[in-house]
Amino acid sequence: MKAVVIGSGSWGTGLAQVLCDNKVDVTIYGNCESEINDINENHRNSKYFGGIQIHPDLKATTDINVVKGSDIVVLSVPTIAIESVCKQIDEILDKKTIIVNTSKGFHPETFERMSCVIRENISEEHLSSVVSLIGPSHAEEVVIRMLTTICAVSLNEEDAKTVQETFSNEYLRIYTGTDEIGSEVGVAVKNAIALASGILSGLGYGDNTRAALMTRGLMEMTRFGVAMGGKKETFMGMTGIGDLIVTCTSQHSRNFQAGYEIGKAGTAKIFWETNTKTVEGVRTAKAVHEKARELGIDMPIVNEIYAVLFENKNARESAKQLMTRDLKPEMVF
């Protein structure tokens, strides 16, 4: 089997090493020459993992033509780049290929889920199916082979099983799933909730606050996901509450880190002036806020995140308003 990972960032490198550990013929494609050279010459990806040594047999290239003849192509790039990358590799692929999506978000203009974007931009003659490899995970832990469990979610159960078997080993366990809508919505919306978790931590709030946020955030994720066509039970699994927990509580999370800086500053002004990283929760908060308003779905947490990010609302005032909403019974599914 031949596999190519598109993206030489942290998660692309981590997943490529998994495949290398599993004795799969795998190559990383990236457009950053310094990262590619670091992987090939030093067996490191210092930009993301410092001095951590990665598998000595892992190879990387800046030649996109490496995807030709692949059985599996893993897309490990930001959501904003998925469409253009798919169009590019579709011109090179020469057979039906399993496309593995790892991005967690929505198309910035059409609000489509990533699996839909991929299917629209990879021709039928080159696409076996889309499998989303998603769930509670940080590359910083996978790359040092810490025990991790995620899901291979697809409308094509056979391809999901192929991905499950290809990636699973003694430190990475893969479950399969078929609720594409619920899973993709869950892993996307939790990024926005994780921003809120970071904001509250930056404001100085503690465990009680975070527990309340994650619980009520889960309700918003579920309410929104079911309205979009997902199954409510999906949100009790790896791509729902699992991913929500890890992203809301981990210092590895870019969304948590960004939120923390906003909370410390009190507003998002400095974040917009200084941020250079991809923070998927920012785009997700905007997209979900607008879609929920269009559909008439009540999402008070997401609404306040949107107000802090895009309306320059004071973060502490947002937290206060969430706490002083009209009192009501707890509504759970």
Image: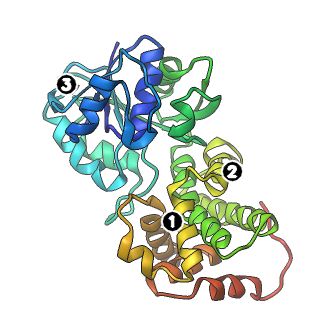
Picture residue at 45% right of the left edge, 67% below the top? 282
* Up/down of 312 relative to 309, above or below: below
Identify residue for label 2.
Answer: 241
- Which of the marked residues, 1 or 3, is nearer the chain's N terminus? 3
Disc 1 vs disc 3: which is toward the camera? 1
Q: Secondary structure at mark 2?
A: helix
- The three-letter code of the residue at mark 1 reads Ala
Apparent side of residue 80 relative to residue 169 in the rendered image (left or right) = left
Identify residue for label 3.
Answer: 66
Apparent side of residue 176 relative to residue 92 in the rendered image (left or right) = right
Q: Secondary structure at mark 1?
A: helix
Residue 40 image point, x, y percent: 28, 24
Q: Secondary structure at mark 3?
A: helix
Chosen colour scheme: rainbow
Identify residue for label 1.
Answer: 258
Q: Is residue 118 visible?
A: yes
Apparent side of residue 47 relative to residue 142 in the rendered image (left or right) = left
Q: How far apart, in angstroms, are the residues tagged by discs 2 and 1?
A: 21 Å
Crowd tier of the residue under label 1, counting other residues whose Cα lies within 10 Å: few below 14, some 14–19, many 20 or above:
many
Q: Is there CB contact under 8 Å for labels 2 and 3? A: no
Q: How far apart, in angstroms, are the residues tagged by discs 1 and 3?
A: 35 Å
Picture residue at 42% right of the left edge, 66% below the top? 283
- The three-letter code of the residue at mark 3 reads Val
Picture residue at 47% right of the left edge, 18% below the top? 166
- Which of the marked residues, 2 or 3, is nearer the chain's N terminus? 3
Residue 93 image point, x, y percent: 19, 27
Along the line of sight, the residue nearer the viewer: 221 or 191: 191
Disc 2 vs disc 3: which is toward the camera? 3
Disc 2 vs disc 1: which is toward the camera? 1
Picture residue at 51% right of the left edge, 30% below the top? 143
